[in-house]
Image: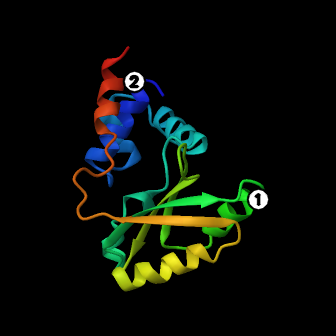
Amino acid sequence: MDSLDARILLALDDDPDVTTLALAHRLGIARNTLHARLQRLRTTGALRDFSRRVDPAALGRGLTAFVSVSLSQTTARRAIAALHDIPEVIEVHATTGEADLLLKVVARDTHDLHRISDTLVQIPDVVRTSTVISLKEEMPLRLRALLEHRTAAV
């Protein structure tokens, strides 16, 4: 990602509803250049799905928890595949340390979280889990500062 890519993403962050033509004009680049760069950003995975911007609370899932999962080392792939079938599991990270995975899970309330936890421990190859409930998001995912830094780096 170069400085122009970062400028494009910052401009989209400022005005997600801007038209391609208006954005190209604002940035002083050709519409075809903008289109090609946006396509490349999508294709390479640098520009992720729009749904990542949706607040889970707007979907009735206002409780966030982080679940550490220890897996059987011989068949971990099967367990990871099973996690994709649980809609409340919104992120999965392979980690170092005591647990093998760190999950970000959203739920309606603590009773719903208990149901999700029961589902997790029933997955074959899950050895144990440990759950921590988020009380408050102190700082949401932020990438703007990194993008701004990229525009300054030439």
* Residue 54 picture location, percent across and down: 36, 64
Q: Is 28 displayed left or right of 84 in the figure?
A: left
| Front residue of 37 and 78 | 78
The answer to whether 40 is drawn above or below residue 132 in the figure is above
* Residue 125 picture location, percent across and down: 70, 66
Tell me what residue is drawn at x 53 percent, y 44 percent: 97
Furthest toward the right, the residue is 74
For numbered disc 1, what is the local secondary structure?
loop
For numbered disc 2, what is the local secondary structure?
helix
Mark nearest the camera among 2 and 1 is 1
Q: Which mark is residue 3?
A: 2
Mark 2 / mark 1, whichever is N-terminal: 2
* Residue 71 picture location, percent across and down: 65, 59
Q: Is 111 displayed left or right of 102 in the figure?
A: left
Tell me what residue is drawn at x 45 percent, y 37 percent: 31
Residue bearing mark 1: 75
Question: What's the residue type where badge 2 is placed?
Answer: Ser
| Labelled pair 2, 1 in contact (Cβ < 8 Å) | no
Question: What's the residue type where badge 1 is placed?
Answer: Thr
Mark 2 → mark 1, Cα distance in angstroms: 43 Å
| Front residue of 12 and 46 | 46
Q: Is 28 displayed left or right of 122 in the figure?
A: left
| Front residue of 98 and 96 | 98
What colour-coding does the image apply? rainbow
Tell me what residue is drawn at x 49 percent, y 50 percent: 48
Quarter of the view holding residue 4: top left
The answer to whether 93 is drawn above or below residue 115 in the figure is above
Quadrant the C terminus occupies: top left
Furthest toward the top, the residue is 154
